[in-house]
Amino acid sequence: MSHTRSSKVVMVTVDHQKKLYEHLEAASKLLKPDIPENANIVIKPNLNSLEGPQTGLTTDVQTVDALIRLLNEKHSPERIAVVESDTWCRTAEEVFFRLGYEKLPKKYENVELINLTKAKKLKVCLPHPKHFKFLWIAKTFLECDYYITAPTLRTLFPTRISCALKNQFGTISSRYKAKYHPYLDNMLANLNLLIRPDLCLVDGLIGYDGNPIPTGLLVLSNDPVANDTVVAKMIGLSPRRIGHIVLSESLGVGSMGDVQVFLDGEEIVNLDGVIQRFSQTNELLYFASEFGYLLIRSGDRLRSLGQSIIARVVTSVGPLKKYSKREILRMLFDRQAWKSFLSMSKEMQEGQTAT
């Protein structure tokens, strides 16, 4: 997967859904994505819900269909994998069936649907870890030649926006992803470093800010950071206040500045004529959630510190496995045992000082 340095964001107004292919083709000609011939391509739509695209929550299968047609006609890929992972409330197979994605392999011989939760995985170390050191990543991403993320246009609590960068969260193979939420900014930046999208296609025909909003836009970009920066501004948000965008830029995923922006074929300097303000996440709720996640992170640090102390003690006095649970409890509440431990600790410190 390549890292194109010249960041472009191309927006096209879709006046009729039947013209999706024509609009996508025009945007692609302007963006000029570097798609290799006979490639192994992966497409990750946003299918986090069983609700249809009319809600603004999920990527319309017609948008993905138009993308696959364009890829087949212009670049002759050997294989196209449309992927999604399970969540706690639904499986990938259920959402593929409910939202009509199951028709794609029947229509195109080189297309297959892949459940990332069931696919073969590799243990991959995170480039800049904070709490989690590694993730299990589906080999599908690590073996592909070109990766396309196809998110929707949404505001989301607590990340404020869900677009190209946030769509990577669905690449995590685990069905239960809630444990990553307190570390979401860091996790998203790391994911986008590991499996950086080569192309972003935002299905903005209908946006979502708690309710569906007809927006009538497709957004195409070769830079997920630039993409989300422009989209955030377009819906009235400040990208500099969105943690995962800022952190992704700082880690080298993409650029928030010096971005070429096009609307319906014309380069534009500002977004004044495009801005369609969405209802922003309630600030009180946002900061309340951030405080809650701060407490969780602090608790995790304290637990890690406690485990380190226990490991140090066990290493010093020998394994506790030879004691029964009752004996361990008795020692915890035995004054003489504590005196012996403190005396031994003092001797160890004096020995280290002498050394």
Image: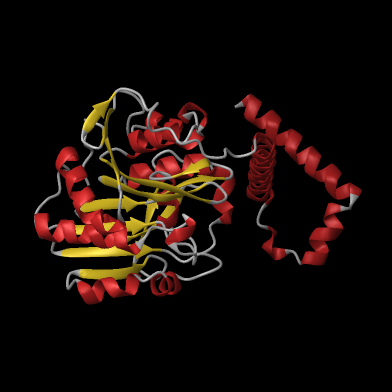
Camera-nearest residue between 27 and 2 = 27
Camera-nearest residue between 307 and 219 = 219
Q: Residue extending furthest right? A: 335
Residue at 50% x, 40% y is: 185
Residue at 66% x, 31% y is: 351
Could you tell whether 132 is left or right of 323 in the image?
A: left
Q: Position of residue 116 (x, y in %)?
A: 38, 65
Residue 279: image quadrant is top right
Residue at 22% x, 47% y is: 1
In the displayed structure, 40 sits above or below 236; it is: below
Q: Position of residue 296 (x, y in %)?
A: 67, 44
Could you tell whether 278 is left or right of 327 in the image?
A: left
Whether residue 5 is visible, yes or no, is no
Q: Position of residue 303 (x, y in %)?
A: 67, 46
The quadrant of the picture occupied by the C terminus is top right
Could you tell whether 57 is left or right of 349 in the image?
A: left
Residue at 49% x, 41% y is: 161
Camera-nearest residue between 325 and 185 = 185
